[in-house]
Image: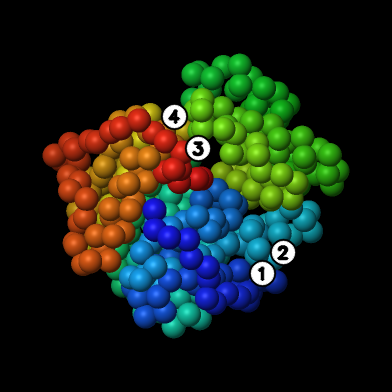
């Protein structure tokens, strides 16, 4: 990882609808612009992501998406209007932030939900994107959400039973949690958030990698689960399969995709489909990594970003799915990408 750096500029950007999004910039003011798109949705940005970027080569922008992190209003507040927190709103916020910072084009890096938002933005504004690096590829299709919150339960039946019980065994589990997260009683919301995060840990955080979802506390956890359930209950307001269908719009944008073969929450098939539909993308399959990545995942992210900083068109030696390349070493905590 590159050295720890502190932001040299930061602020709150008014994006309308009563929302202010927090942003910060670090690295070299004259460097290659790069935007970190965090996961979740609703996780908020992590300063640790700066360390994937050479501070001498990059001008690194972090921001908190609507309703989370240091953006306001926070989704943990029941008065926060979630009707103006959708994928289209977030894409518009990213473009407004680019204009606010005077950036012509930028590299996009992120993982998990962040990859969905990256793809939505890049397909809307391909002329504004130089390169893309994604770990733990998702496109938030309804089929992917159904797998994460229902289908994969066959591998974790005891945890899944507890998860469904938390939603009162409703037919639409995710929709039921979204309703609970809007309940006027904070105790009800806290119980639902705890049940949701316990399920996320069971599926996405294998033994030895801790409980990063359950470890979220107080308003951070409430906001995270309210936003997650809100987005997933609505299919992220995307037509089913749209991001892969429209991947041809990414032609000419070099991309590096990194995905763990053991990702139980987001199976490899989505990354494979995307790489086949995006001619300039190269896919790394990390044999022993799950959704949160690991040491090898972290190395591949660094290799990709360092390579793009040097002008390497497709760094890291990855092959297209047509060539079937995979790499793998045991995962370690230093490469965790978050969600």
- Look at mark 2 in the image and give the residue it sits on: 73
Q: What element carries label 4?
A: loop
Locate residue 322, reporting x and y percent.
15, 40
Q: From the viewer's perspective, is residue 2 above or below residue 284? A: below
- Camera-near label (3 vs 2) is 2
Residue 93 seen by the camera: no
Q: Quadrant of residue 190?
A: top right
Using the image as rendered, state which of residue 125 and residue 142 is in the foreground.
125
Outermost residue, left side: 323
Earlier residue among tags 3 and 1: 1
Marks 2 and 4, how far apart at CA: 33 Å
The crowd level at tag 4 (other Cα within 10 Å; few <14, some 14-19, many 20+) is some
Q: Is mark 2 on a helix, strand or loop?
A: loop
The crowd level at tag 2 (other Cα within 10 Å; few <14, some 14-19, many 20+) is some
Locate residue 292, reporting x and y percent.
46, 39
Earlier residue among tags 1 and 2: 1
Residue 264 got which mark?
Answer: 4
- Look at mark 1 in the image and give the residue it sits on: 19
- Answer with left or right where residue 215 lies relative to residue 116: right
Q: From the viewer's perspective, is residue 35 above or below residue 227? A: below
Earlier residue among tags 3 and 2: 2
Q: Residue at x 34, y 51 (%)?
A: 301
């Amino acid at each position: 990882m590159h050295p720890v750096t502190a932001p040299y500029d930061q602020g709150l950007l008014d994006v309308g609808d009563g929302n202010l999004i927090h942003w910060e910039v670090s690295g070299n003011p004259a460097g290659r612009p790069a935007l970190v798109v965090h996961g979740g949705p609703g996780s908020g940005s992590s300063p640790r992501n700066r360390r994937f970027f050479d501070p001498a080569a990059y001008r690194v922008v972090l921001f908190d998406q609507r309703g989370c992190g240091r953006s306001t209003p926070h989704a943990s507040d029941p008065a926060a209007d979630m009707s103006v927190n959708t994928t289209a709103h977030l894409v518009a916020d990213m473009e407004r932030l680019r204009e606010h910072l005077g950036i012509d084009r930028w590299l996009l890096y992120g993982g998990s939900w962040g990859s969905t938002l990256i793809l939505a933005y890049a397909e809307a504004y391909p002329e504004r994107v130089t390169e893309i690096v994604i770990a733990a590829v998702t496109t938030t299709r309804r089929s992917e959400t159904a797998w994460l919150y229902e289908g994969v339960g066959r591998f974790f039946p005891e945890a899944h039973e507890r998860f469904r019980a938390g939603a009162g065994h409703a037919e639409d589990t995710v929709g039921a949690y979204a309703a609970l997260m809007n309940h006027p009683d904070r105790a009800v919301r806290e119980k639902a958030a705890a049940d949701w995060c316990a399920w996320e840990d069971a599926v996405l955080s294998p033994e030895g990698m801790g409980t990063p979802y359950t470890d979220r506390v107080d308003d951070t956890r409430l906001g995270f689960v309210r936003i997650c359930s809100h987005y997933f209950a609505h299919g992220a307001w995307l037509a089913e399969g749209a991001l892969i269908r429209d991947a041809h719009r990414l032609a000419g944008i070099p991309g590096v995709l990194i995905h763990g073969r053991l990702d139980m929450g987001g199976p490899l098939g989505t990354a494979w489909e995307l790489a086949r539909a995006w001619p300039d993308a190269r896919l790394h399959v990390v044999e022993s990594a799950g959704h949160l990545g690991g040491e090898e995942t972290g190395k591949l992210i660094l290799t990709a970003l360092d390579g793009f900083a040097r002008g390497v068109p497709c760094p890291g030696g990855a092959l297209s799915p047509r060539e079937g390349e995979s790499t793998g070493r045991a995962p370690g905590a230093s490469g965790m990408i978050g969600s």
